[in-house]
């Protein structure tokens, strides 16, 4: 194991206030593709750009095509937590980890046992009727044919933030609070290109800012520690 990982393990062992901020790369080891890597969603052949399909305007104009893509490319009901998810849950149980802030919508942090999870972009496990607000689970969307409809006849959409929609301001403020108070901030599985979420790390006030990512990012030079390794493997080692 490289020296940087051993350093992170020491920092984790000596810290009582850790916050984790993660992106799509956290779940790739669970079989869920990320967006911008060679094998990512944006590199796959599609008739239209994924960022156009997964947008508020597209959902309103072409709901059938939206849900076809959404079911095929955005939902992975068989995925299970990997070493990163499980390691973070363990650190929370130990009282070290105060919060997981995630851009992911897969719910794997909760499946691993994490309790304080701030889902900046929502979750595929929550769905609601745009007409009456009635709530539905993931199974309802998966088992529906075409466009899922509510008992009232309204469209049932996922409670996720689509392109063209704003993030929840209260949730962002809560995330900022956790990051400001953190002694150790670990950023993992993200290229830090999606705003405003990526800008959250600018609120960190400590001197132990760690980035775990398989590819270089524009923020590497600002990090106190950079690790280029599989994130699940890193957390398995650091929480053993």
Image (cartoon, helix red, strand yellow):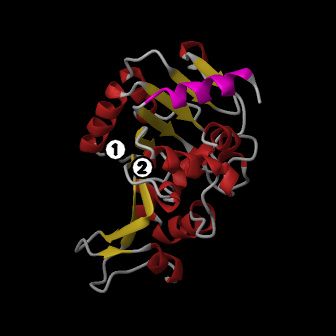
Q: Give the residues in magenta.
A: 3-15
Residue name at image x 32 percent, y 31 percent: 176
- State which quarter of the image contains the C terminus: top right
CA gap, disc 1 and disc 2: 7 Å
Residue 56: x %, y % from top left: 40, 55
100 or 47, which lies in front? 100
Residue ID for mark 2 = 121
* Label 1 element class: loop
Residue 73, can we see it? yes
Residue 62: give x, y in percent of width and height.
Answer: 47, 66
The tag on residue 167 is: 1
Evaluate whether residue 147 shows in this view: no
- In the structure shown, which secondary structural element does the residue marked by tag 2 occupy? loop
| Crowdedness near tag 1: few (<14), some (14–19) or many (≥20) residues, C-alpha within 10 Å | some
Query: Looking at this view, is 127 or 78 the one in front?
Result: 78
Sequence-first disc among 1 and 2:
2
Vertical comparison of 11 with 42: above or below: above
Depth check, front residue: 113 or 210? 113
Looking at the image, which residue sits at the far bottom?
Answer: 151
Residue 233 location, quadrant: top right
Please name the residue shown 68% across and 22% down the image: 4
């Amino acid at each position: 194991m490289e020296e940087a990982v051993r350093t992170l393990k020491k920092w984790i062992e000596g810290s009582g206030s850790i916050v984790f901020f993660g992106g799509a790369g956290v779940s790739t080891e669970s079989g869920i593709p990320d967006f911008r890597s060679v094998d990512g969603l944006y590199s796959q052949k599609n008739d239209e750009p994924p960022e156009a399909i997964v947008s508020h305007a597209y959902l309103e104009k072409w709901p059938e095509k939206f849900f076809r893509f959404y079911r095929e490319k955005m939902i992975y009901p068989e995925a299970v937590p990997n070493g990163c998810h499980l390691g973070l849950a363990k650190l929370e149980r130990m009282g070290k980890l105060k919060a997981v802030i995630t851009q992911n919508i897969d719910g794997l942090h909760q499946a691993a046992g994490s309790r304080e999870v701030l889902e900046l972009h929502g979750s595929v496990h929550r769905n609601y009727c745009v007409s009456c607000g009635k709530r539905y689970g993931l199974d309802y969307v998966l088992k529906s044919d075409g466009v899922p409809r509510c008992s009232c006849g309204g469209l049932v959409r996922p409670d996720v933030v689509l392109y063209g929609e704003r993030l929840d301001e209260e949730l962002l403020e809560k995330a900022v609070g956790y990051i400001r108070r953190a002694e150790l901030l670990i950023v993992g599985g993200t290229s830090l290109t999606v705003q405003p979420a990526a800008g959250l790390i600018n609120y960190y006030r400590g001197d132990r800012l760690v980035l775990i990512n398989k590819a270089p990012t524009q923020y590497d030079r600002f990090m106190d520690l950079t690790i280029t390794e599989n994130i699940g493997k890193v957390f398995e080692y650091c929480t053993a």
